[in-house]
Image (spheres, grey):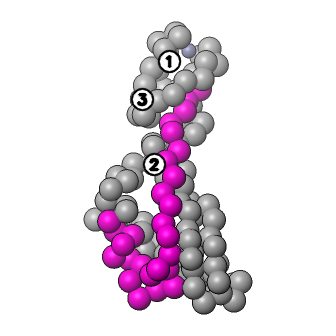
Amino acid sequence: MHEFSIAVDIVDIATSSARKEAASVVKEIEIEVGQLSGVVMEALAFSLEAAVKGTMLEKARRNLIIIPGKARCTSCGHEFDTDTLYTPCPACQALAPEIIQGRELRVKSLIVE
Ligand SMILES: [Zn+2]
């Protein structure tokens, strides 16, 4: 499953940055997931639960933050909300907008101890 390898990566990233701060436990982790990142939220949440077992993140509170999709029309410059990569511009119907937000997939912050 795609989401499981993402979950493992997230745990790796969080573990190594917690180690850099000489922490032994991660209390909370915030993860930003863009609506257009192609990640299925429920699958990621489920995968994280398995991926944190036996790690510093085992007891961490997991906050998954959804970043809504936003696009800018390359013809008229109109900015609009979108939940797909291929939504035509609502103002001028031009195709292939530039995606300006919603592809994020990153560890936003950690609270360590
Ligand atoms: Zn347009």
Q: Residue at x 64, y 19 (%)?
A: 77
User: x, y (%) of residue 103?
Assistant: 52, 46
Q: Which residue has dot 3 on it?
A: 86
Mark toward the start of the polypeptide (2 vs 3): 2
**Residue at 50% of width from left, 61% of height from top?**
63
Residue 58 on the magenta segment: yes
Query: Within 10 angstroms of label 2, few (less than 14), some, or many (20 or more) residues?
Result: some
Q: Where the C terminus falls, by quadrant?
A: bottom right
Of circles 2 and 3, which is in front? Answer: 2
Task: Name the amino acid type tagged 1.
Answer: Cys
Callout 3: few (<14), some (14-19), or many (20+) C-alpha neighbours within 10 Å? Answer: few
Q: Hey, what amino acid is under mark 2? A: Ser
Mark sitting on residue 89: 1
Is 3 colored magenta in this rendering?
Answer: no
Q: Which of these two is toward me, 111 or 47?
A: 111
Residue 47's disc number: none
Could you tell me which quadrant the N terminus lies in? bottom left
Image quadrant of ligand 1? top right
Report the front residue among 18 and 25. 25
> Does the numbered disc 1 mark a residue whose Cβ is under 8 Å from ligand 1?
yes
Which amino acid, by three-letter code, is at mark 3?
A: Tyr
Residue 49 visible in image: yes
Q: Which residue is mark 2?
A: 37
Q: Secondary structure at mark 3?
A: loop
Instruction: Quote the CA–CA distance across marks 3 and 1.
Output: 9 Å
